[in-house]
């Protein structure tokens, strides 16, 4: 059995580790090295969604209602897989409007209404209290299970012992510890743009711990308990357990769909989830990673729910509380260490939820409940106080304590009864009341403030009557008699059979009526009420956030003294940050704040957005309006400004795109110019070489002709001089023929004698014709020529010309004194491939295409001058391409160059096997 001291010590050590991580995260943020700018850390922080209800209650739900537990995970998975349509839009709007909470989001959309923000805050507070109570109950009960399971097994079954005194209650002490953590790492500053990096890092770490703990218990349930099942009764019990777990839940598909919808709404509308997903998001692109990584996390959390539930049903008594199978299953086998790890996982789940919920609610209470009231109390003269940042922090800190104490009070009043899932559904159902107003804010321009207020109030009151009242009625505070036959004896008003709608599962019944009242009130009142100018402007900004730049929209024609704006801002965010903000604004707009005695509308809007990040949009609007003079622009004027700004930005983007295109074109032109210069240089070399090649034989011919003409020579000398003249004439003729041949090929005037030719035979003839070159230089020539599988359609003489040119080049450029040349011919890819490889200096990668140009040629290694006419490879390329083939060069594994020619066969090879390269002949 685990003793109290051990459990408390481990729990305190773990909480101390969380404090250390949060402290380290804040220190890193202060030095500019953020821990939360990673999409993985951001995604793991989103797992604050997996509270103790998920950690403990999912197994309990599976044991009681079968596969219904899957709805907890499917709803968020659907939302995140479709993040592009909903979450991305909310994030974009929230960043541009400096949204601080879900109340601020809804209030901003509907005319920055302070009253609407108050309504949302009150509903969120009431709806969150049961969820906080759930976490405190889970911690308190799991602690009791660990301490007393072996001594008093009934505790694990009924857990009906009287609650401890408040000061010694584990739930109370946990609430105080969570409040301290939330205050230390959640109220260090008040600007929404400065994120709670330490808190987010600790939440991400807790998500890893609870996943590890749950997977450990799951593996234990599968691989350990499977081997301990006894034949006979044990196997029968296990089989019966699996049969119950895989059944469709009671209530049919209606409850299953209800639960799925609730979890979809919860991942968007729960205050803590909105805070982590939207407010703490530092990069919109992180949502892309979270769209697949977060569903993966949920899948892993759900992977072992059924095995743990099956193990609990087979090993524990029939009346055992299934909510705590994650703890009691390891304990039945004496694995107290694993049970302690599971307890830490449950503590992580509860702590993360409560801390984030407390911070989110404290922000809403401060910005949307307390500050609007204080600003309306004239005698407080808050506008004249020097520093309001401290006041805001104290309000939030007090709010955190108040939220947790109210959650604890709810736990003591009602939290001792009912499964964890039932308590969690209460909060899910009330959070869903925000869903119509949010969807309307994003996609319906005609939704009005009056409609949103009406829908929220009607939906909340209907939820309270159909769901909260029956829950309280079953607690120890009230008598269940209020459920029957209905208030004032009116049967149609029974909370669980409203207006005579009987036979529905209570959750489906409550959600149906509350959402019906909410949506009908929102839509109908919006249709029959008018928006004021600010509502219409905000509606256009929200709905068209991807079409127009909302941060640039000015809705006021107003001005104010720069000094007054600066003084107002520094009262809320401090002198240093206010100075920095004004300097950044001036630098961005190319102005000097000191030269502006009066701020224009842009600067006024800039200050309002900064204040909105600290006190909320509604309060910021009121404070700026108290010192700024002017009037609200008309809707048409604002839309014209927005459209003009949109057009300017679009035009700017077009200019940027054209600029990039021009840069790319200039780069291509630069490259082309460099290539032309290189070709021009090669042309000069070519002309120089051709001139030299022409002058040399002409000089010889003229010289020997003059000798024969002017001098008396012997017959023997005359014959020798005539031979030289004849040889030089032939040399001159070949050079001219080459140039003329290339000209005819380029102009398409060459004659072709096409026929079916055996390429292997042509290659063999070419090798034989050039054999003297290799023998004269004592080169090592290796030949591996395979028969062609099919003939090629070609001009045999022209093909011979190509092969001889490649072989001559190989003989010319092979290593002097140790020359090695390899000639390969083989069928390949529906044709015939010829490869000529030498061991010379090779061809550099940048010259592989250039050498086939008509002015390009290699330089002689000794003289450095171009060798040959430089037309052989150009002519060879024209010949090969005329035959529909391809010629290229590549670098062999060893030193040298390899020239390849591929020719297509007249018909495909008859065999399916590609011939292998034959062994080279010695």
Image: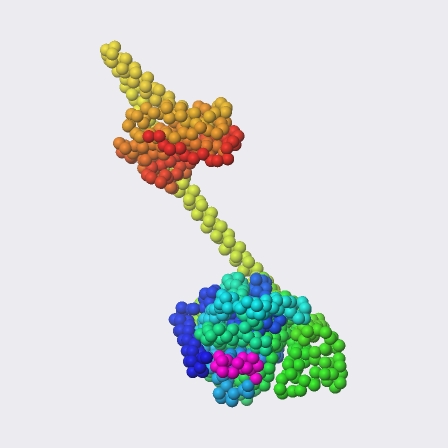
The quarter of the displayed image where residue 80 is located: bottom right
Query: In which quadrant is the C terminus drawn?
Result: top left
User: In the image, is residue 586 part of the stretch drawn in magenta?
Assistant: no
Residue 456 visible, this orientation: yes
Q: Is residue 485 above or below residue 93?
A: below
Query: x%, y% of residue 726?
Result: 32, 17
Residue at the spot 40% in from the left edge and 40% down from the top edge: 675
Please identify the residue farthest to the top as the structure is shown.
715
Relative to 217, residue 834 above or below: above
Q: Name the residue rendered at 57%, 59% in the picture.
A: 647
Which residues, given as a range, are shown in magenta?
146-160
Does 151 lie within the magenta span? Answer: yes
Q: Nearer the viewer, residue 779 or 362?
A: 779
| Left or right: 803 as drawn, with respect to 441 | left
The type of colouring in the image is rainbow
512 with respect to 187 (left or right): right
Q: Residue 91 at x, y = what percent?
A: 54, 67
Give the camera-side residue of 584 and 240: 240
Residue at figure coordinates x 47%, y 35% from the top left: 914
Compared to 156, does 750 lie above or below?
Answer: above
In the rendering, at what x and y percent does residue 905 appear? 50, 30
Q: Position of residue 520 (x, y in %)?
A: 70, 72
Q: Quadrant of residue 820?
A: top left
**Total number of numbered labels?**
0
Q: Residue at x 52, y 31 (%)?
A: 910
Residue 561 seen from this side: no
């Amino acid at each position: 059995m685990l003793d109290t001291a051990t459990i408390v010590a481990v729990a305190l050590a773990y909480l101390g580790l969380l404090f250390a991580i949060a402290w380290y995260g804040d220190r890193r943020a202060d030095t500019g090295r953020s821990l939360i700018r990673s999409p993985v850390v951001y995604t793991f922080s989103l797992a604050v969604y997996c509270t103790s209800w998920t950690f403990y209650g999912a197994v309990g739900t599976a044991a009681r209602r079968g596969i219904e537990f899957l709805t907890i995970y499917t709803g968020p998975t659907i939302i995140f897989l479709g993040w592009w349509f909903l979450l991305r839009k909310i994030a974009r709007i929230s960043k541009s409007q400096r949204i601080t909470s879900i109340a601020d989001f809804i209030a901003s959309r509907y005319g920055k209404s302070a009253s609407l923000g108050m309504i949302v805050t009150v509903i969120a507070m009431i709806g969150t209290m049961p969820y906080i109570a759930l976490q405190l109950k889970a911690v308190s009960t799991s602690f009791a299970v660990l301490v007393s399971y072996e001594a008093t097994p009934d505790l694990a079954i009924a857990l009906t012992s009287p609650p401890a005194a408040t000061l010694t209650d584990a739930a109370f002490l946990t609430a105080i510890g969570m409040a301290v953590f939330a205050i230390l790492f959640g109220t260090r500053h008040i600007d929404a743009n400065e994120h709670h990096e330490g808190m987010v890092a600790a939440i991400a770490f807790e998500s890893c711990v609870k996943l590890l703990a749950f997977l450990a218990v799951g593996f234990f349930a599968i691989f350990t308990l499977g081997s301990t099942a006894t034949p006979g009764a044990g196997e029968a019990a296990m089989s019966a357990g699996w049969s119950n777990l895989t059944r469709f839940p009671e209530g049919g598909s209606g409850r299953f769909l209800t639960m799925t919808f609730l979890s979809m709404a919860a991942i968007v509308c729960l205050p803590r989830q909105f805070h982590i997903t939207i407010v703490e998001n530092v990069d919109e692109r992180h949502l892309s990673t979270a769209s697949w990584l977060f569903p993966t996390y949920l899948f892993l959390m759900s992977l072992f729910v059924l095995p743990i539930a099956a193990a609990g049903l087979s090993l524990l008594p029939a009346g055992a509380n299934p909510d705590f199978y994650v703890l009691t299953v390891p304990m039945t086998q004496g694995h107290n260490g694993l049970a302690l790890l599971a307890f830490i996982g449950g503590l992580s789940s509860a702590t993360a939820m409560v801390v984030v919920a407390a911070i989110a609610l404290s922000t809403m209470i401060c910005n949307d409940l307390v500050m609007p009231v204080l600003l309306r109390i004239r005698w407080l003269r808050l506008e004249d106080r020097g520093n309001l940042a401290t006041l805001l922090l104290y309000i939030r800190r007090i709010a955190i304590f108040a939220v947790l104490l109210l959650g604890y009070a709810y736990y003591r009043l009602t939290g001792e009864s009912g499964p964890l899932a039932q308590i969690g559904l209460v909060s899910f159902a009330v959070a869903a009341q925000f869903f119509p107003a949010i969807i309307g804010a994003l996609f319906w321009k005609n939704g009005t403030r009056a409609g949103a207020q009406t829908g929220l109030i009607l939906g909340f009151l209907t939820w309270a009557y159909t769901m909260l009242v029956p829950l309280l009625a079953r607690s120890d505070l009230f008598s269940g008699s209020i459920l029957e036959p209905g208030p004032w004896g009116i049967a149609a008003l029974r909370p669980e059979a409203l207006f005579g709608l009987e036979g529905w599962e209570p959750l489906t019944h409550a959600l149906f009526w509350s959402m019906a009242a909410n949506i009908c009130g929102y839509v109908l009142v919006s249709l029959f009420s008018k928006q004021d100018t600010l509502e219409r402007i905000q509606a256009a900004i929200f709905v068209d956030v991807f079409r127009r730049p909302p941060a640039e929209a000015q809705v006021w024609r107003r001005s104010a003294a720069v000094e007054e704006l600066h003084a107002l801002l520094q009262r809320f965010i401090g002198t240093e940050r206010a100075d920095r903000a004004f300097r950044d604004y001036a630098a961005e707009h190319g102005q000097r704040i000191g030269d502006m005695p009066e701020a224009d509308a842009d600067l006024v809007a800039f200050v309002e957005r900064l204040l909105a990040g600290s006190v909320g949009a509604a309060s910021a609007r009121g404070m700026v309006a108290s010192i700024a003079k002017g009037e609200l622009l008309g809707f048409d004027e604002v839309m014209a400004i927005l459209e003009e700004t949109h057009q300017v930005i679009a035009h700017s983007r077009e200019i940027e795109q054209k600029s990039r295109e021009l840069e790319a074109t200039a780069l291509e032109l630069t490259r082309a110019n460099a290539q032309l210069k290189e070709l021009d240089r090669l042309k000069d070399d070519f002309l120089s070489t051709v001139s030299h090649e022409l002058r040399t034989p002409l000089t010889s011919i003229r010289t020997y002709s003059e000798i024969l003409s002017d001098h008396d020579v012997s017959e023997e000398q005359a014959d020798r001089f005539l031979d030289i003249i004849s040889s030089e004439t032939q040399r001159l003729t070949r050079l001219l023929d080459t140039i003329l041949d290339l000209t005819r090929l380029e102009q398409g005037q060459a004659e072709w004698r096409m026929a079916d030719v055996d390429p292997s035979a042509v290659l063999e003839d070419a090798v034989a014709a050039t054999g003297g070159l290799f023998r004269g230089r004592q080169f090592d020539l290796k030949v591996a020529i395979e028969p062609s599988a099919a003939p090629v359609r070609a001009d045999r003489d022209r093909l011979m010309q190509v092969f001889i040119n490649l072989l001559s080049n190989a003989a010319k450029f092979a290593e002097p004194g140790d020359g090695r040349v390899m000639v390969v011919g083989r069928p390949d890819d529906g044709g015939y491939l010829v490869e000529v490889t030498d061991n010379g200096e090779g061809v550099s990668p940048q010259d592989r295409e250039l050498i086939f140009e008509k002015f390009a040629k290699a330089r002689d290694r000794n003289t450095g001058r171009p060798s040959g006419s430089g037309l052989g490879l150009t002519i060879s390329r024209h010949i090969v391409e005329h035959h529909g083939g391809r010629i290229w060069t590549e670098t062999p594994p060893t030193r040298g160059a390899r020239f390849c020619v591929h020719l297509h066969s007249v018909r495909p090879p008859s065999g399916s096997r590609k011939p292998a390269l034959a062994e080279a002949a010695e």
